[in-house]
Image (spheres, rainbow, N blue to C red):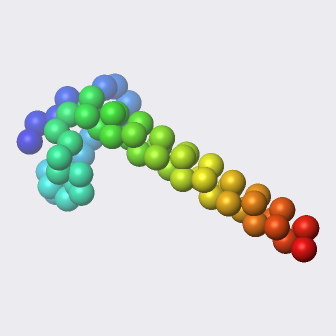
Amino acid sequence: MNFDYPEGVTPLDADEAAGLLLTHITNRSELGRWEQENTTEAEAALRAADRQGYELLLGFTRS
């Protein structure tokens, strides 16, 4: 595996590259897209959890 790295980036050695869990990602563009999708999903989950917590708080304070 041969990687090209921008200046200042710590390169992966062969063992580290072989141990990557995201085997479906083959280039930086795919990694960037996956990271953005993952972040968007996490933000949505946090907003949903926050709404649920707020609704639980409202129910508790009204009883």
- Tell me which residue sits at (68%, 55%) in the image: 50
Between 13 and 35, the one lying in front of the other is 35
Residue at 68% x, 60% y is 52
Q: Is residue 60 left or right of residue 4?
A: right
Is residue 30 visible in the rendered structure shown here?
Answer: yes
| Residue 30 position within the rendered picture, expressed as x and y whole percent measured from the top left | 25, 34
**Residue 13 makes an appearance in the image:** no
The x, y position of residue 43, in whole percent, is 55, 46
**View extreme (left): residue:** 1
Residue 33 placement, left or right of 15: right
Q: Quadrant of the C terminus?
A: bottom right
Task: Identify the residue at the far top of this view.
Answer: 7
Please state if 8 lies on the left or on the right of 15 as rendered: right
Residue extending furthest toward the right: 62
Q: To which quarter of the image does residue 62 belong?
A: bottom right
Q: Quadrant of residue 1?
A: top left
For residue 9, above or below residue 46:
above
Q: Between residue 22 and residue 47, name the one nearer to us.
A: 47
- How far across and how far down the image is residue 60, in percent? 85, 71
The residue under the point 46% across, 46% down is 41
